[in-house]
């Protein structure tokens, strides 16, 4: 089967990775940063044109304040520090999710990354940050109502955070959890799912390649019947 055009990843298990080592959860989030680097590299190598990484959900605000603050600081640092290298590699960065409520510094880093990487043509890297699928759908409905356009799927999409983003073909989740946790609810309608027991900080380039390979063997039917030859 064809290569995936869009791979989206629910990066889960940072906390458990750390706990298993007797480390604070923060250490897991820091280690997760390396896994992000490896994954971006793998996506570029595999020629995947769109990669979305779920970094913070609208429900993650339920965590202790210190953890939320640590995550936001980490995202800010990663955006400032990694963007120049990503730009060199031809990566274009987008961030989807609610900007309101995010700290000023993080918002500035997001704007910097998006503007600085604007010419990237090799890979579209989308960070889902303060993102919730339900929130995105509500936003799109609001947009649609205000526009007065007919209620069609196409017009609804205009109100999504990144209307040109294709639906994910493959959704990967680490740490063995079998749920979608409010990720790309509308867009995931026909996504293929691939789950690994590994915690996110242990996710490797090989794991990414394995998931893409598994995807290629899947038969997507979109509600139809299997295509048979001859
Ligand atoms: C990282 O994993 C995902 C984020 C929300 C940043 P977790 O922090 O959810 O790790 P676990 O699931 O508690 O192990
Ligand atoms: C999903 O992970 C959100 C991100 C990866 C950012 P969670 O750890 O928040 O999901 P639940 O709470 O286990 O469903
Ligand atoms: Mg988790």
Image (spheres, grey):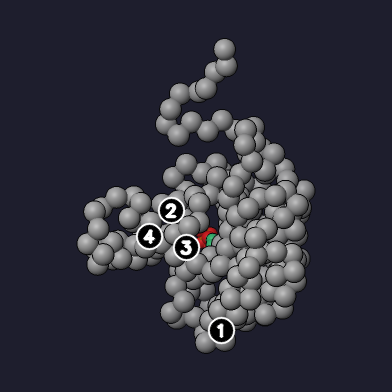
In this rendering, position of residue 207 left or right of residue 177: right
Name which residue lies at 24% across and 67% down: 146
Residue 105 in view (yes/no): yes
Disc with the residue nearer the chain's start (1 vs 3): 1
Quadrant position of the C terminus in the picture: top right
Vertical placement of residue 153 versus 214, above or below: below
Q: Crowding at label 4, few (<14), some or many (≥20) Cα neighbours within 10 Å?
A: some
Residue behind mark 1: 108
Rounded to the nearest whole Å, what is the CA distance between mark 1 and mark 2? 28 Å
Q: Secondary structure at mark 2?
A: loop
Name which residue lies at 44% across and 59% down: 163
Rounded to the nearest whole Å, what is the CA distance between mark 2 and mark 4? 16 Å
Rounded to the nearest whole Å, what is the CA distance between mark 3 and mark 2? 14 Å
Which numbered marker is on residue 185?
Answer: 2
What percent of the width, then of the height, locates residue 209? Answer: 73, 46
Which numbered marker is on residue 22?
Answer: none
Rounded to the nearest whole Å, what is the CA distance between mark 3 and mark 4? 8 Å
In this rendering, position of residue 210 left or right of residue 117: right
Disc with the residue nearer the chain's start (1 vs 2): 1
Kindly give the residue lying farthest to the bottom in the view shown: 104
Q: Secondary structure at mark 3?
A: loop
What percent of the width, then of the height, locates residue 96? Answer: 50, 67
Residue behind mark 4: 158
Quadrant position of the N terminus in the picture: top right
Q: Nearer the viewer, mark 1 or mark 4?
A: 4
Q: Secondary structure at mark 1?
A: helix
Name which residue lies at 54% across and 69% down: 95
Rounded to the nearest whole Å, what is the CA distance between mark 1 and mark 4? 25 Å
Q: Secondary structure at mark 4?
A: loop
Residue behind mark 3: 162
């Amino acid at each position: 089967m064809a290569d995936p055009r869009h791979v989206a990843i629910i990066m889960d298990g940072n906390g458990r990775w750390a706990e298993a080592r007797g480390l604070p959860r923060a250490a897991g989030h820091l280690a997760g940063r390396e896994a992000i680097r490896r994954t971006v590299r793998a996506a570029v190598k595999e020629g995947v044109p769109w990669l979305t990484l779920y970094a913070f959900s609208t429900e993650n605000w339920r965590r202790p304040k210190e953890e939320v603050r640590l995550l936001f600081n980490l995202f800010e640092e990663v955006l400032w520090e990694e963007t120049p290298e990503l730009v060199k590699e031809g990566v274009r960065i987008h961030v989807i999710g609610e900007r309101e409520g995010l700290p000023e510094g993080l918002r500035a880093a997001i704007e910097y990354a998006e503007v600085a990487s604007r010419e990237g043509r090799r890979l579209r890297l989308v960070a889902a940050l303060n993102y919730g699928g339900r929130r995105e759908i509500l936003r799109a409905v609001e947009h649609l109502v205000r526009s007065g356009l007919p209620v069609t799927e196409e017009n609804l999409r205009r109100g999504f955070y990144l209307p040109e983003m294709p639906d994910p073909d493959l959704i990967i989740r680490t740490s063995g959890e079998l749920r979608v946790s409010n990720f790309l609810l509308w867009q995931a309608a026909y996504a293929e799912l691939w789950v690994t027991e590994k915690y996110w900080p242990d996710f490797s380039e090989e794991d990414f390649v394995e998931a893409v390979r598994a995807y290629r063997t899947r038969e997507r039917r979109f509600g139809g019947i299997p295509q048979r030859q001859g």
